[in-house]
Image (cartoon, rainbow, N blue to C red):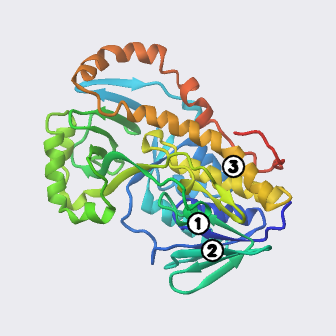
């Protein structure tokens, strides 16, 4: 095993607390440093946790607190105009959980603190100094922290990524702007059913909210990216007017937008993905989660992959003889899997805004595609059935997942 006993984790979103929890279980003390002055209340919308992500949370005893705040999604469907098609699934792997990002942050923070993890806020990383036996982080407030390794769990706009590689690629705008709300309108769908709808104005999805009404999310085509601050500077009433105009001809999009209030509209902001990152680690620094891999939300796997990577990194630091071997093996275990899933999501993105001809053909072709091409075991089986064997020692050069 390595001599790593301490770790600095930069970023307190999803990957950060899970990384600290997994390191704690591996016998490594981690401190989480978050740039925000407090927990990120009001940032982000609802995200999906797939069965493989829930299984990875089970390793750090966080699965039950997380599923307690989630809405289990047992079935999925696709809607084009007024035609609706039930999609095949894998019922034996467990439901997907729809979880609000704020609630997930809260639960993971509470779980980490309960295990003795120290989480500091208002610590924006500005520089790192490495020595032969450790690494020191310097923060904007003038404070510093020193440990054996530094882990960048600081998201898609990662500072650690540019410290590892000043020429690293940055996030790529998908051409979509995200919104979410709960409409008073009740859709004709069984509880636990998520529907993916292809509207004339863009792609959206919806599901019955357990407390009543219908929760919906929209990917509105947008010419240029907008920061979250820019998007939220636009009055919610104006965004809702734009959404009602874009989805006014759709069923049930029209009623979902019409019965949603501006006060409840959540602006998620521009949606980005991470192209393949050339260098995941250098020296005593390494990336985890969205800093290294952030597939489109079409994958339904972004948060789950971040959680998996956090656990696998902890296993490698626990079992391998030195830091370079641990980081290299961690990357080998993760890169192929996350890039395959990102590629699948990219193919889905290309179908999110079908033109008039495609929209006409889709209802005609869907029954055939469901019977032939949409084999869930072939397309999703390896993703959803993936499980990390925490108890099994990691060997240098371990086969990729």
In terms of sequence position, does the residue under pointer 3 or pointer 1 come before the other? 1
Compared to 376, does 65 lie above or below? below
Instruction: Determine which residue is flagged by label 2.
Output: 128
Contact? badges 1 and 2 (CB < 8 Å): yes
In terms of sequence position, does the residue under pointer 1 or pointer 2 come before the other? 2
Tell me if residue 131 can be seen. Answer: yes
Q: Residues within 10 Å of mark 1 (few under 14, many from 20)?
A: some
Instruction: Determine which residue is flagged by label 3.
Output: 331
- Residue at left 27%, top 63%? 230
From mark 1 to mark 2, how far is it between C-alphas? 8 Å
List x then y, in percent, for residue 31: 64, 74
List x then y, in percent, for residue 316: 77, 54
- Secondary structure under tag 2 reads strand
Contact? badges 3 and 1 (CB < 8 Å): no
Compared to 217, does 158 lie above or below? below
From mark 3 to mark 1, how far is it between C-alphas? 18 Å
List x then y, in percent, for residue 344: 50, 33
Picture quadrant where residue 321 is located? bottom right
The C terminus, quarter of image:
top right
* Frontmost residue, 109 versus 293: 293
Instruction: Determine which residue is flagged by label 1.
Output: 163
- Residue at left 65%, top 73%? 117
Q: Is residue 3 left or right of residue 295?
A: right
List x then y, in percent, for residue 272: 41, 50
Q: Is residue 281 left or right of residue 210?
A: right
- Residue at left 41%, top 39%? 192
Q: Which numbered disc, 2 or 3, marks the residue closer to the eye?
A: 2
């Amino acid at each position: 095993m390595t001599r790593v006993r301490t770790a600095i984790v930069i970023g307190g979103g999803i990957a950060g607390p899970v990384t600290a929890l997994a390191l704690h279980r591996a016998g490594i003390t981690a401190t989480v440093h978050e740039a925000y002055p407090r927990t990120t209340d009001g940032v982000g919308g609802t995200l999906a946790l797939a069965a493989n992500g829930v299984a990875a949370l089970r390793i750090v005893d966080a699965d039950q607190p997380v599923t307690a705040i989630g809405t289990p999604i047992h079935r999925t469907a696709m809607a084009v105009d007024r035609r609706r098609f039930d999609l095949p699934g894998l019922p034996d792997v467990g439901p997907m959980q729809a979880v609000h990002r704020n609630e997930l942050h809260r639960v993971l923070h509470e779980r980490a603190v309960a295990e003795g993890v120290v989480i500091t806020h208002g610590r924006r990383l500005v520089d790192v100094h490495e020595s032969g036996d450790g690494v020191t982080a310097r923060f904007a407030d003038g404070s510093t922290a020193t440990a054996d390794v530094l882990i960048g769990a600081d998201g898609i706009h990662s500072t650690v990524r540019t410290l590892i590689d000043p020429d690293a690629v940055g996030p790529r705008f998908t051409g979509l702007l995200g919104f979410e709300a709960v409409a008073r309108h009740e859709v004709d769908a069984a509880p636990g059913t998520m529907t993916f709808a292809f509207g004339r104005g863009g792609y959206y999805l919806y599901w019955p909210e357990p407390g009543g009404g219908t929760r919906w999310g929209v990917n509105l085509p947008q010419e240029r990216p907008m920061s979250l601050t820019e998007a939220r500077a636009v009055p919610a009433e104006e965004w809702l007017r734009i959404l009602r105009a874009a989805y006014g001809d759709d069923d049930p999009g029209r009623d979902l937008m019409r019965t949603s209030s501006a006060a409840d509209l959540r602006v998620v902001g521009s949606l980005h993905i991470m192209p393949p990152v050339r260098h995941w680690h250098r020296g005593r620094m390494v990336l985890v989660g969205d800093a290294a891999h952030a597939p489109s939300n079409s994958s339904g796997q972004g948060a789950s992959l971040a959680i998996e990577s956090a656990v696998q990194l902890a296993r490698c630091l626990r079992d391998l003889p030195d830091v370079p071997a641990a980081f290299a093996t961690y990357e080998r275990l993760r890169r192929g899997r996350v890039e395959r899933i990102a590629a699948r999501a990219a193919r889905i993105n290309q179908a999110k805004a079908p033109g008039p001809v495609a929209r006409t053909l889709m209802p005609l072709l869907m029954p055939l595609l469901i019977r032939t091409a949409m084999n869930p075991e072939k397309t999703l089986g390896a993703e959803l059935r993936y499980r990390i064997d925490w108890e099994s020692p990691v060997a240098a050069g371990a086969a990729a997942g």
